[in-house]
Image (tube, grey):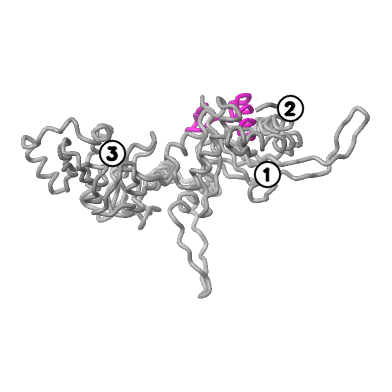
Amino acid sequence: MARYQLLLPKMGESVAEATVINWLKNPGDYIEADDAVVEIATDKVDSEVPSPVSGKLVEQLFQKDEVVQVGDPIAIIETDNAQNEEVPVAATPEEKSTTEKEPEAQAAEPTNVPGMEQLQQRPAPEVQSAVNNSSVRFYSPLVRNIANQEGINVTELDAIPGTGADGRLTKDDLLTYLNNRQKSSTIPNTVEAKQETSAPKQPTAAQQPAFTAPAVSISGSDEIIEMDRMRKLIADHMIMSRQTSAHVTSFVEADVTNLVLWRERNKSKFEKREGEKITYTPIFIEAVAKAIADMPMVNVSVKGTQIIKKKNINIGMATALPNGNLIVPVIKHADTLNLVGLVKAVNDLAIRARQNKLRPDETQEGTFTITNIAAFGNVMGTPIINQPQVAILAIGAIKKKPAVLETPTGDVIAIRHMMFLSLSYDHRVVDGSLGGMFLKRVADYLEAWDINREV
């Protein structure tokens, strides 16, 4: 018998920790290779961790709602492979202190152990501080490390409100606090040695008291529904985006008659040949990718006073989940895919998003986002920018309308398929001229659709 440590795998460059939200296997259960053992949640997406080996689950090393660092062991599995040496279980704090006192007694780490390739990817241990020892509140190693680097003591850390499970302080909570503290520290001291006789100046926005949500009255007939983890993340992300970017929204109406007729003509043939249904979303993504290639300053992010111009065109598509929440899977290098490739990528990501089977890295590194509000019967909207991007496009419902057409023999009124496009953009770096021209360019690509195009 051998004991195998199941480690929390690497889930993307920016993902350092995850929360255990549900154990799918219990101690004593037999696990086949590739069976899902535990369901975890990052700040981006929920995911499952499969076992690479077969065997019996011996121990769960973390409880539900506890935070795990990437590379940490999360479970012990007893395998039938007698050739493998036993993998030591993670030591308790008491065992660690004993081990530190007797380094010469430590055995050499085995070289051929299942999961060794995961162990080699584990991050270096973080420096312990008083935060870990003198506070009754739980802090993840990542939060403790940030606090140590920023010089935050235990008292200050305990006073920061948390949005995690049971009020736990998350990385985002701490970074938001640090950002607000930095802004506060830049306010000049108004107490001067020389008193001014002029009228006092009005306080700046930074000097205004912090916003407090109004009180909500609750009657006996009202139902109280606690936000789930994803809804809390969405709420925080939306508020952060409005506070970060100067939102402006532009609108344009596009005649997509040729596009609608082309899709009606080709959708059955396309599905028979490719085994995929062709929707409007990949067509919109293709038009957006072309427009970004023409106007790359929409494909940027802001870091302080620096504009980061993105090389890759990675289009996120907002996807509604069965529980009513939203998630934004990302199509990487969208400009390099043809229409067939975009159709397959869109369908695959949408299906796995609704089945909660997205990988964390499939929701990261987006540079521009599309949200299809037509799915809800809406004709236009003012979407909130998906940070750290600077623009988001809302696709309205396609409606038949009477429209004026210019012909060689004069203007005529005809029934056309019309739709509104809405672009919300960050006015700090995208001026009205660029935002308006970009939106019109997307509409131009859709209006100029070749009705005889082959796929």
Q: Which residue is mark 3?
A: 71
Q: Is residue 99 magenta?
A: no
Disc sitting over residue 396 in the figure: 1
Give yes or no for contact between labels 1 and 3 (Cβ–Cβ under 8 Å). Answer: no
Residue name at image x 36 percent, y 48 percent: 40
* Image coordinates for residue 171, horizontal then vertical, percent: 37, 45
Residue type, label 1: Gly
| Quarter of image, res 47 | top left
State the extent of the magenta-drawn residues as a range. 283-309
Within 10 Å of disc 3 (Cα), the crowding (few <14, some 14-19, many 20+) is many
Q: Earlier in the sequence, mark 1 or mark 3?
A: 3
Q: Which residue is mark 2?
A: 452
Please tell me whether mark 1 or mark 2 is closer to you in this view.
2
Work out whether 51 lies above or below 228: above
Please tell me whether mark 3 or mark 2 is closer to you in this view.
2
Helix, strand or loop status at disc 2: loop
Work out whether 430 lies above or below 209: above
